[in-house]
């Protein structure tokens, strides 16, 4: 299986030379990785995938698969899509309308000149794996969006691509089918160890599927890491707020929206972390906040502040609580029912180890935030 390497990749479109769709991107996609390119609309994810596929040419930089150069702008090298041996599935699945499901899957194998004797067996195998074998005599127009997406995936998988490039391939599915297909993709990846590059703007999808997540914003790679590393140690404000649902509570010192709570959290973080004068902003994930009736119930050393319970929003399996904490609005999530009435005056607290601490430029300051240590402490204390 191959490793894909992007070096110093720039991409500007002719219609918009001023801004770069992708800006100085360095990305190593290791052999057998399930890499999710994650970010908001317009951040350059699809452009990156299309460059790997050979559907777009970079404006500068180099793309390699192992030692094979696919693009090298300075040397005028560009290997066309059909010679890259990558499987592609896009949001629109482009099935042949006049061919049945079986023939659509068989088509890819014919193009690859797989002998007829092997084709039928291979087609049956992938149709079975994706649980669409009972649909094999239908035409695309007779299928639901989700079934069409599965046929598109089957067509790709049939030819055993060494790299699978997927652009929001689950976007048209309902919640249940999406979940099923995520599991399916994970199984495919586990079984074949195919290198997968997967574009999504859905952070939950990225967190559940990826071995590695590349978070992008405005054409620039913000952070590359495992889903847990991205969640536990976001490198800047953008990543901190983009990953997580509900989003991280984030307060900035000197900003007019919640100066008191910002000053309280920043002052506490500085004192606990020997960071005097360095803290510009502090984030707390909703699941890291806790409520008690009175400050005397707060564990020693934890940060706390008076809070008013403004609303409780049950989701069915958990509770989201809107709180007024000093002068700021915070969200808390709880797996247990919340035993306070609306407008109750309570105390909100969190541990120092659960704070995400950033400097004036919204860049993370390495501090007492080691997530592994934190979990050990929590397991040990029974919290
Ligand atoms: N063919 C094109 N011509 C001109 N500009 C383009 C073209 N394709 C994309 N862009 C611009 O490049 C930037 C990145 O677009 P891209 O499609 O890569 O983002 P994305 O993160 O995949 O977004 P989405 O999730 O909405 O698909 C955007 O500003 C977009 O408007």
Image (tube, grey):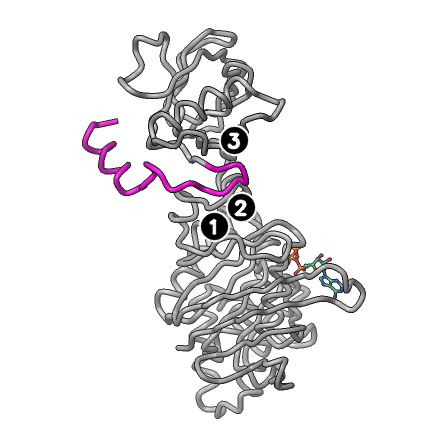
Residue 202's x, y, as percent?
A: 55, 48
- In this view, the residue in front, 110 or 120, is 110
Q: Secondary structure at mark 2?
A: helix
Q: Is residue 221 above or below residue 204?
A: below
Q: Is residue 104 left or right of residue 377?
A: right
- Give yes or no for contact between labels 3 and 2 (Cβ–Cβ under 8 Å): no
Residue wearing tag 3: 250
Residue 376 lies in the magenta stretch: yes
Q: Is residue 245 left or right of residue 41?
A: left
Residue 107's x, y, as percent?
A: 58, 82
Q: CA distance from mark 1 to mark 3?
A: 30 Å
Q: CA distance from mark 2 to mark 1?
A: 6 Å
Residue 33's x, y, as percent?
A: 41, 66
Q: Secondary structure at mark 3?
A: strand
- Give the residues drawn in magenta, as a range: 358-383
Quadrant of residue 272 within the rendered picture? top left
Which one is closest to the eye, mark 1 or mark 3? 3
Q: Residues within 10 Å of mark 2 (few under 14, many from 20)?
A: few
Residue wearing tag 1: 179
- Give yes or no for contact between labels 1 and 3 (Cβ–Cβ under 8 Å): no
Residue 380's x, y, as percent?
A: 18, 32
Q: Residue at horizontal 51%, vertical 23%?
A: 262
């Amino acid at each position: 299986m191959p490793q894909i390497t992007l070096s110093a990749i720039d991409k500007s479109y002719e219609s918009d030379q001023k801004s770069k769709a992708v800006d100085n991107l360095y990305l190593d996609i290791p052999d057998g990785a399930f890499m999710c390119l994650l970010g908001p609309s317009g951040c350059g994810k699809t452009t990156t995938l299309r460059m790997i596929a050979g559907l777009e040419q970079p404006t500068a930089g180099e793309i390699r698969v192992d030692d094979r150069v696919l693009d090298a702008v300075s040397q005028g090298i560009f290997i066309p899509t059909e010679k890259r041996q990558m499987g592609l599935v896009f949001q629109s699945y482009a099935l042949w309308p006049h061919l049945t499901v079986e023939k659509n899957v068989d088509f890819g194998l014919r193009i690859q000149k797989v002998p007829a004797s092997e084709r039928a067996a291979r087609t049956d195998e992938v149709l079975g794996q994706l649980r669409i074998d009972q649909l094999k005599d239908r035409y695309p127009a007779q299928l639901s969006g989700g079934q069409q997406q599965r046929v598109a995936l089957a067509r790709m998988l049939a030819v055993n691509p060494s790299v699978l490039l997927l652009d929001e391939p689950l976007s048209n599915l309902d919640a249940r089918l999406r979940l099923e297909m995520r599991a399916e993709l994970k199984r495919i990846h586990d079984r074949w160890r195919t290198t997968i590059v997967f574009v999504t703007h859905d952070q939950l999808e990225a967190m559940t599927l990826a071995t590695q997540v590349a978070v992008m914003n405005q054409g620039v790679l913000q952070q590359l890491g495992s889903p847990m590393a991205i969640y536990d140690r976001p490198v800047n404000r953008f990543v901190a707020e983009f990953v997580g649902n509900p989003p991280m509570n984030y307060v900035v010192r000197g900003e007019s929206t919640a100066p008191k709570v910002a000053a309280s959290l920043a002052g506490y973080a500085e004192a606990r972390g020997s960071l005097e004068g360095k803290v510009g902003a502090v984030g707390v994930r909703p699941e890291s906040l806790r409520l008690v009736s009175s400050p005397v119930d707060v564990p020693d050393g934890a940060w706390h502040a008076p809070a008013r319970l403004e609303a409780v929003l049950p989701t069915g399996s958990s509770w989201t609580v809107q709180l007024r904490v000093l002068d700021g609005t915070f969200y808390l999530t709880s797996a247990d029912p919340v035993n306070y009435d609306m407008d109750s005056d309570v105390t909100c607290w969190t541990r120092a180890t659960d704070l995400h601490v950033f400097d004036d430029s919204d860049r993370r300051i390495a501090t007492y935030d080691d997530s592994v240590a934190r979990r050990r402490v929590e397991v040990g204390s029974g919290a």
